[in-house]
Image (cartoon, rainbow, N blue to C red):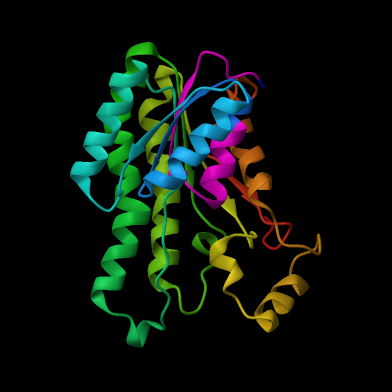
Amino acid sequence: MSLSGRVALVTGASQGIGRACALKLAEAGAAVALAARSQEKLEELAGTITAKGGQAATFVMDVGDEQQIKAGCKAALDKFGKIDILVNNAGINRDQLVMRLKRPDWDAVLNINLTSAYLSIQQVIGSMLRQRWGRIVNMTSIFGQMGQAGQANYAASKAGLIGLTMAIAREVGSRNITCNAVAPGFIETAMTAALSEDFRQNALKNIPLGRLGTSEDVANAVAFLVSEEASYITGHVLKVNGGMLMG
């Protein structure tokens, strides 16, 4: 699955799933535009990629800020001349039961998890349309498919990404641009590290493969969807959840 000659923009690239995706795409031969809030973490990742013979550039971007998205995407386009692949990975959670959920926490999660994806797509779609080739992957979640108590904002944002994915897939499919989503289940990340051991053990009981996933498991799915091997797949939600949700 060679991505030689392709340019990929990954949001939330400084850690976790985003970092794993950036490393995987670089390993496959893509030049990678790394976007996140932490300059220090981005520089460390860029150094790791270049040390392995890859190409990477860093772009400090808070996807909660529309102007930063526009400026960051423009800078990446100016640097590389095009964007072939967009991975909308940046996201947050602010969990609370709906009766106690504050409006600012609703707005923040919807803005960062969903609105930022629309804005990022809008900034790079012109490049894809001109070259009649593109790959967009939106990072949704198992909880955007099945819901989760205490995560009304998070689940709504991730379900919204699924709808966005299908709409974009229909809009741009005729120009050889695919848009898909990846829906991770329980993945070993900083976010899940905060879970109690009881919660973790209960979750494992519902996962047929008997383990939590890794960031690399998710990155492998992303790398497939952006490859030529997946050129006839669009509007699809690829579950990476160990069998926790089937069908």
Residue 168 in sight in this render: yes
Write down the quadrant of residue 113 in the picture: bottom left
In this picture, residue 217 sits left or right of residue 176: right
In this picture, residue 149 sits left or right of residue 35: right
Q: Quadrant of the N terminus?
A: top right
Write down the quadrant of residue 185 in the picture: bottom right
Q: Which residue does the image show at 31% across and 38% down from the upper left?
A: 120
**Rendered position, 59 above or below 76:** below
Most foreground residue, 95 or 232:
95
Task: Give the percent coordinates (x, y) of residue 57.
Answer: 41, 28
Residue 162 belongs to magenta span: no
Q: Which residue does the image show at 72% across and 79% down from the upper left?
A: 202
**Range drawn in magenta:** 2-24
**Rendered position, 178 above or below 36:** above
Write down the quadrant of residue 167 in the picture: top left
Q: Which residue does the image show at 29% across and 64% down from the upper left?
A: 108
Most foreground residue, 126 or 32:
32
